[in-house]
């Protein structure tokens, strides 16, 4: 094999190894992002349940939510 071809093959081999490493890092980043979103959704669900339990137990909170969610009449 001519020396020029050998240099090209060595350079391409290094590039393919780097590409595979970057691909692996990308998979880890996506996996971490998915895990972070799952954790965020779980935290939001637990906080929503805590708020719903508080509203159900406290008559003042229930009255506030009823008043807050009732639409105001539109006057023309």
Image (cartoon, helix red, strand yellow):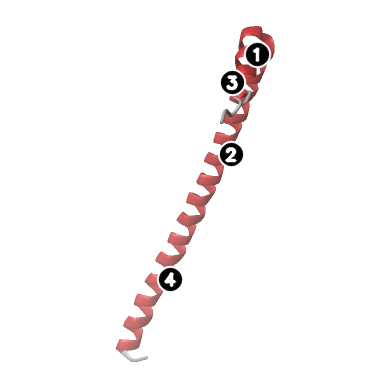
Which residue lies under the disc numbered 2?
Answer: 38
Q: Is 31 or 74 nearer to us in this picture?
A: 74
* Callouts 1 and 2 close, C-beta under 8 Å: no
Q: Residue 62 bears which disc, if any? A: 1
Separation of marks 4 and 1 at Cα, in angstroms: 62 Å
12 is higher (above) or lower (below) than 62:
below
Q: What residue occupies the far front of the structure in this picture? A: 76
Q: Please name the residue that numbered disc 3 is placed on.
A: 68
Q: Classify residue 28 as left or right of residue 41.
A: left
C-alpha gap between disc 4 and disc 3: 60 Å
Nearer to us: label 3 or label 2: 3
Q: Earlier in the sequence, mark 1 or mark 2?
A: 2
Q: Which mark is residue 16?
A: 4
Q: Could you give the CA–CA distance between mark 1 and mark 2, rounded to whole angstroms?
A: 30 Å
Q: Hey, which residue is sitting farthest bottom in the picture?
A: 2
Callout 2 touching callout 4 (CB < 8 Å):
no
- Indicate which disc residue 26 carries: none
Of the two numbered discs 4 and 1 on the same chain, state the one appearing first in sequence. 4
Label 3: few (<14), some or many (≥20) within 10 Å? few
| Image marks 3 and 1: residues in contact by CB distance under 8 Å | no
Label 3 and label 1: CA atoms lie apart by 10 Å
Q: Earlier in the sequence, mark 3 or mark 2?
A: 2
């Amino acid at each position: 094999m001519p020396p020029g071809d050998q240099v090209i093959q060595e350079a391409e081999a290094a590039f393919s190894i780097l590409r595979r490493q970057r691909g692996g890092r990308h998979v880890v980043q996506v996996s971490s992002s998915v895990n972070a979103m799952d954790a965020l959704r779980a935290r939001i669900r637990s906080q929503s349940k805590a708020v719903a339990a508080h509203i159900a137990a406290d008559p003042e909170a229930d009255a506030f939510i009823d008043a807050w969610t009732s639409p105001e009449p539109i006057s023309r």
